[in-house]
């Protein structure tokens, strides 16, 4: 019996057989074949004889899908989440739109987005549960304007991240979130995001700033916005933020990944808390629109 040689065009010694992939991930060959047949994942190359060969990068993707399954996420959602995050965009807004197409964007003024953000932060602070938190601020000055508030949020968190055009990464302290720098070409430099997760409620807001607004007053800037209390969408957004932290060189990023992998996603949203959050957001938005210009 002969064994087909692995493909050599650009693969080198990293090409893996299905048995080697199974051994390194703990997912049996039979299960890997079922995933491929039903969901197109993982996606092997084929030798002329029909043998499956996998990339080294497939090892981590399969491991993460298996981890998400063990955390209670449906297989289809886990595959969609992991393969979307493996893409090059590293955008909270873009990833949510791709992984959760049921989320419909709305075009909102900055004052309304700020009202939604404040409502989410207040609800998070009012919770008795320690959670995790991530926020994208575009520019460091926007983070600095909210620094005292985020100091309080950090103290109510297992961990927290702030992402903006910072000069370099900075580990979190007792009173400040970890600071994650965004590269000059990072898609998230155009985004406003707030992602909060506790054992009883996950909520995320992601906003993309439309171009061509250079001449507008700051308060009149408009964003395309999605927000949701879907626990799986919230976890997807958190993983994007942690992924960006890892790419930026944040030393604690692997620990944050491990924390997410070890923490089950809430099976459903707490509807009473979701309703309270919605009412709080309405109040903030109403006050913002009644305020004098």
Image (cartoon, rainbow, N blue to C red):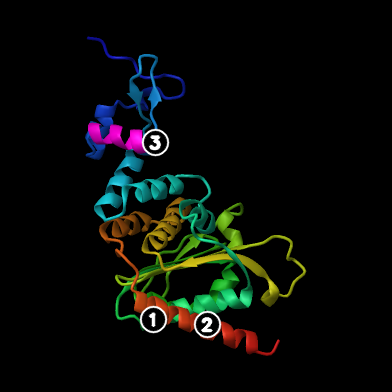
Splitting the image into 4 quarters, where does residue 164 fall?
bottom right
Q: Would residue 37 be counted in the magenta stretch?
A: yes
Q: Secondary structure at mark 3?
A: loop
Q: Which residue is mark 1?
A: 125
Q: Earlier in the sequence, mark 3 or mark 1?
A: 3
Find the residue positioned furthest to the top. Answer: 1
Task: Give the Cα distance between marks 3 and 1.
Answer: 42 Å
Mark 2 touching mark 3, by CB under 8 A? Answer: no
Find the residue positioned furthest to the right. Answer: 215
Task: Give the Cα distance between marks 2 and 3.
Answer: 42 Å
Q: Which residue is mark 2?
A: 282
Image depth: mark 1 or mark 2 in front: 2
Image depth: mark 3 or mark 1 in front: 3
Q: Secondary structure at mark 1?
A: helix
Answer left or right for 142 relative to 128. right
Give the magenta range.
Answer: 30-38
Q: Which residue is mark 3?
A: 40
Q: As displayed, is residue 22 above or below residue 168?
A: above
Mark 1 touching mark 2, by CB under 8 A? Answer: no
Task: Give the Cα distance between marks 1 and 2.
Answer: 18 Å
């Amino acid at each position: 019996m002969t064994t087909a040689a692995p493909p050599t065009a650009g693969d080198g010694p990293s090409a893996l057989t299905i048995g080697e992939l199974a051994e390194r991930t703990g997912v049996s060959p039979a299960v890997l074949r079922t995933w491929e047949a039903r969901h197109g994942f993982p996606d092997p190359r084929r030798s002329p004889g029909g043998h499956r060969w996998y990339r080294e990068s497939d090892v981590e993707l399969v491991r993460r899908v298996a981890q998400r399954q063990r955390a209670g996420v449906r297989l289809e959602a886990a595959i969609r989440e992991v393969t979307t995050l493996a893409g090059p965009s590293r955008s909270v807004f873009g990833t949510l739109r791709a992984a959760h197409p049921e989320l419909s964007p709305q075009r909102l003024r900055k004052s309304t987005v700020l009202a939604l953000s404040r409502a989410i932060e207040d609800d998070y602070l009012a919770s008795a549960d320690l959670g995790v938190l991530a926020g994208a601020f575009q520019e460091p000055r926007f983070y600095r304007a909210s620094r005292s508030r985020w100091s309080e949020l950090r103290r109510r968190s297992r961990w927290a991240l702030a992402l903006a055009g910072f000069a370099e990464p900075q580990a979190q302290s007792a009173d400040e979130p970890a600071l994650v720098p965004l590269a000059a070409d990072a898609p998230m430099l155009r985004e406003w995001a707030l992602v909060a997760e506790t054992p009883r409620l996950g909520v995320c807001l992601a906003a993309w700033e439309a171009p061509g607004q250079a001449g507008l007053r700051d308060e009149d800037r408009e964003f395309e916005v999605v927000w949701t209390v879907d626990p799986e969408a919230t976890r997807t957004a958190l993983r994007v933020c942690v992924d960006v932290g890892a790419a930026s060189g944040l030393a604690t990023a692997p620990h944050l990944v491990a924390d997410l992998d070890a923490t089950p996603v809430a099976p459903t949203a707490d509807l009473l808390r979701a309703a309270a959050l919605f009412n709080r957001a309405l109040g903030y938005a109403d006050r913002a629109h009644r305020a004098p210009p």
